[in-house]
Image: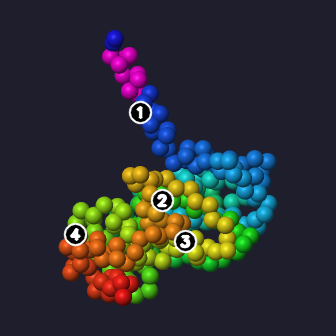
Amino acid sequence: MDSNQLRNPAHQIIRQSLQAVDPAGAVKRALTLKERSRLCIGDKEIDLDGFSRIVAVGAGKAGQPMSRALEEILGDRLEGGLVVVKDGHGGPTERVRIVAASHPIPDERGVAASRQIAAILEGCDEKTLVICLISGGGSALMPAPVEGISLADKQETTRLLLGCGADIGEINTIRKHLSFLKGGGLVRLAAPAMVLSLIVSDVVADRLDAIASGPTVADNSTWRDCHEILERYCIGHQIPDAVGRRIQNGLN
């Protein structure tokens, strides 16, 4: 067998693997539009004529190709929206606005974009369909902290968690308790709108509550979990005072 024959199967495997993880392709496999009004997701259908608005929001490194794919599927039915991506991961879109922010340490651009997403969601009603585009990195890119926690607090906490050896599930357990859009916060803010989530996983075992800190998924973690993570990695004495107080108050 010559070298070309040996290489061809490998090339096919690589090509098929890349196609399988292509975020735009994943969106197009998940969603199809029939007769301009029936949005099909697996074996379910949504009648788009029941909605006066369709908007897209989200965050993650795959946000731009996911947004483009959604635009191609929905066309002028998609009103617009906002998706936050990592620096260098942007690109052209027609309806969804793409905003870049810092990853893995959050920055003020991510906070501002999070607040803009919150404003979009607060303007939704029962006649709005919100399509949430989530992919890896979304937790850092959509970081808006809860009241009493500053961006600097979140930045330092993130640095400590990244440096101590905590895994992504543990890191995001802490981040969910410091952010108002994570741990299902996005869905709560969008109510009573219908929310459809399209999620590209970068987490082992595809834990939906861990991917981007689960903005559209119920949070099953607890304040006790947060405390135990800080104790496990011996960083409880290093975290910012405001973070420590929030976790301690949650325990009480």
In this view, the mark in front (1 or 4): 4
Q: Nearer the viewer, mark 2 or mark 1?
A: 2
What element does badge 3 sit on? Answer: helix
Report if residue 153 lies within the magenta region.
Answer: no
Q: Where is residue 241 shown, x and y percent of the image? A: 28, 86
In this picture, residue 111 sits left or right of residue 83: left
Q: In the figure, 224 relative to 166: above or below?
A: below
Return the x and y of residue 61 as percentages of the image width and height. 44, 56
Count residues near mark 1 (Cα–Cα under 10 Å), then give few for <14, some for 14-19, many for 20+.
few
Of the numbered discs 1 and 4, the one sitting upstream in the chain is: 1
Task: Please state which amino acid type lies under the numbered disc 2.
Answer: Leu
Q: Quadrant of the C terminus?
A: bottom left
Going from N to C along the chain, the mark reached first, 2 or 3, is 3
Asked if residue 6 is among those painted magenta in the image, a careful observer would answer yes
Mark 2 to mark 1 CA distance (whole Å)? 26 Å
Magenta span covers which residues? 3-11
Distance from the alpha carbon under mark 1 to that under mark 4: 38 Å
Percent across and percent down for residue 160 are: 25, 71
Q: Pointer 1: what residue?
A: 14
Residue type at the position of mark 4:
Tyr
